[in-house]
Structure formats: C-alpha cells, structure tokens
Amino acid sequence: MGAATARALAKQGYHVLAGVRRPRDADTIRAENIEPVILDITIPEHIDALVDRIDADPEMRSLRAIVNNAGIAVNAPVETLPLDQWRLQFEVNLFGHIALTQAMLPFLRRSHGRVVNISSVGGKVAMGTYGAYAGAKFALEAVSDALRREVASHGVQVVVVEPGGVKTEMTGHGIERARAFVEEMSLDQRQHYGPLMHAIINQATAFTETGVTSDAAAVVIAKAVTTRKPKTRYTIGRDAAMLTRLAKILPDRTLDRVAAANLRPHFPKEPAR
C-alpha cells in the first residue's frame, strides 16, 4: 500500500505490512506499526514469502485486510503502444493483484477480512491514450465485482476505491514516460498522434496539480479498510465523482464530445503565420 495509507492505518493502531520494491524504500517508510516487506506482486517468490511471514507472525495476529494499490501508467495510443508494454501494465495493474488476492484469501476467510482494490476513474471512463491503463482498471473493476459476489458468503468483503487526480509519484512517473514515448515515436506516428500526446501530457499535469494530496486520499482508503459496513465503491476527488456520474448518464457520443472539449485547451498552440 502507499506510504500515506500505511501511516494513516498505523496511527489507528493497526500493524501494517507495507509492500515496497527496494530496500531503500523500506528505510523511508519504516515507523511505529509499519513493517516494510519487499514485495513485487509480479514475482511469485515475493508473494510466497509474504504468506510465510503472515503464517509465522510472532504475535499470531490475523490478517484483516489487503490493499491492492500497485500500479504503473504508460500513456500512448492503442496503435503505437508495443504489446510488451500492454502486457506489463496488465501484469502489474491486474494479474499481480489477482495473484496476491488468491494467496491472501485463506487468511481473510479466517478473519472475515477485506480486499480493497485501488482502481481509478480510468476504470469507468477510458480517455484517449489511456487504453492499456484503463483496460486493466476496467478489468480490475469487473474482477472486484465477481470476487465480491463469490466471497460474500465467506464473510469476506470486497471494496473498490476510484481516485481521480491525486498527487503521487506514479502520476509523475507516468507523465515522464509519456514524454519519453513521444520522443521514441516514428515520424509517421508523431504526425498522427503527436498533438494528442502533448495535449494529454498537459492535461495530466494540470489534472495532477489540482488533485487531492496523497494524505487526503489515504483518509478515504483507510476508511474503506476499517469502517464496519463499507460501501462497495468509494471515489476520491470531485473530478472522479463527476466523471463517474457522467459515464452513467451520458450517451457515448456525448461523452466523447465532453472529453474532446475538456482536452481542447491543452493542445499545443499553432505557430502564428
């Protein structure tokens, strides 16, 4: 889970096993009630080690919840994004979460615990260049619905959190990757998609700057983890709430026009002639 969420739960007295990918990240997150564990959810041995850690807990504590929040974003048009990049996003943003959930469900059944999946407003609305990211998030929404209906009779709850713009490192990294991807495009690809990519980068930058802080997002996620009777879904940010509502009520073509109008101010200005 994210550092802000780990801190929010630790302050409430929960012992948090916080997954990190590198030892140096462990040093930055370690604190009272926060125990870093090296965890790349795409590596089965890391998940096996986590199972062993929970099984051998020295205080025999129960696992009460898992928060699936690992994610990467690579924005690019469907035509131009290489298949290995599609597979990577699905591996991290979907299959890794499924693998971890499968391994943790025996513990959660015993504790009548909870699975909290961090999706995105991109799991409801797929903007241009977000095909791979939104595709994985749409799938995570569907998997969450199926899982919720499968394990309800086992006493396990499944909750989805759908953030909009949040100031996180992942968002910044995604913008950097998108800029690098534009440089790697062929001349033909840049002619077709260059202006769109620049508009998306500009929009994402503005979207993030006006987004909620990671601490504010952590409050919502911590509530999804700890409240006695959680909703099946929580949104984070007014932008996410608005887009989710619009996606429910607007016809596709109308939503296309709304998306295009919102993106138009972010296109590069044509040089004066």
Image (cartoon, rainbow, N blue to C red):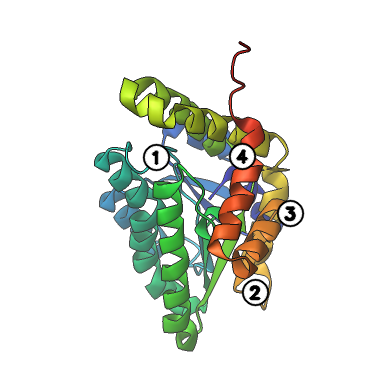
Q: Nearer the viewer, residue 109 or 141?
A: 141
Q: Nearer the viewer, mark 1 or mark 3?
A: 1
Element at label 3: helix
Earlier sequence position, callout 4 versus callout 2:
2
Q: Residues within 10 Å of mark 3 (few under 14, many from 20)?
A: some
Identify the mark at residue 263; answer none if there is no mark. 4
Where does label 2 land, which residue?
231
Earlier sequence position, callout 3 versus callout 4:
3
Q: Nearer the viewer, mark 1 or mark 2?
A: 1
Q: Residues within 10 Å of mark 4 (few under 14, many from 20)?
A: some
Where does label 1 land, which residue?
77
- In x, y percent, where is residue 140? 44, 62
Q: Nearer the viewer, residue 162 or 189?
A: 189
- In x, y percent, where is residue 229? 67, 78
Identify the mark at residue 238; answer none if there is no mark. 3
Name the amino acid, label 4: Leu
Picture quadrant where residue 253 is located: bottom right
